[in-house]
Image: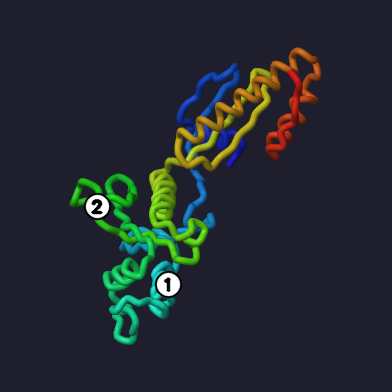
Amino acid sequence: MTSDDFVSAIEANQIESYEHHGATVAIYQDDDPGNPRTDWDQAGTMWCEHGRYDLGDKDARLVLEDAVASLAKSTDHPDYQDMEDFNWGDNADLVEAAVNLGIVILPLFLYDHSGITMSCAPFSCPWDSGQVGVIFMTPEAGKEWDGDAEKIAAYLRAEVETYDQYLRGEVYGYVVETPDGEEDSCWGFYGLDCCKEEAQGVAEWMARIYRHDLVTGFGRGLAAAVKQAMATRAVPHIIT
């Protein structure tokens, strides 16, 4: 691929472009986003089973089995004090045991029609949607929230929302350019509003630096230093 082809491919993914504080803000769809389930450290574990799509976390069922077995050793629940005859191969029995032993676990539903989308709540269409799995948090991981079930559930829903944005291709990047040609860009924003908010903040900051550059006559030397600082987010203090 030539450099011109690369530029054309990027421009083809442009969502919108507008002026903000004298800078040009261009928003693009990120066509190579990271998978939150494989590229990030997650506190929740997502167990999915689907005939066509590879969804969720690897070995998630084993993680749930281990959590249930560990909790069963110290439980007072009469149904799980003796696990010798427990049906480990039945998904419904395993999920029921997890709930009864206090593991925070939420259902996952998938809607498959011209793309896929995931939610913790069922979709209205019964033909193209259905339950695809569960997301849960082990007691060990839940210590960060002091075992608070409501807080854990809210966190798990947020993980699902981010994964859904990934599945729907709602991951974005921005390029901000000042009138003198200085640029800043960043990619991997899950959700359009998040990307635009960050881009506009950068545009305002760059515009401030650009105006300072014009007044002081420091020229492109300052602009280059600013660009370097922005790359590391080590923002220098500049008196205006």
Q: Which residue is mark 2?
A: 129
Q: Is residue 202 above or below residue 232?
A: above
Q: Nearer the viewer, residue 195 or 7?
A: 195
Q: Residue furthest top?
A: 215
Q: Which residue is mark 1?
A: 67
Q: Quadrant of the N terminus?
A: top right
Q: Residue 107, located in which quarter of the rendered image? A: bottom left
> How many numbered circles does the render carry?
2
Residue at coordinates 35% horizontally, 69% vertically from top-left? 98
Residue 194 at x, y = what percent?
Answer: 49, 35
Q: Are marks 1 and 2 in contact (CB under 8 Å)?
A: no
Residue 92 at x, y = what percent?
Answer: 27, 70
The span from disc 1 to disc 2 (Cα, nearest Å) is 29 Å
Q: Earlier in the sequence, mark 1 or mark 2?
A: 1
Q: Residue furthest front?
A: 76
Q: Is residue 33 above or below residue 55?
A: above
Residue 163 at x, y = what percent?
Answer: 42, 50
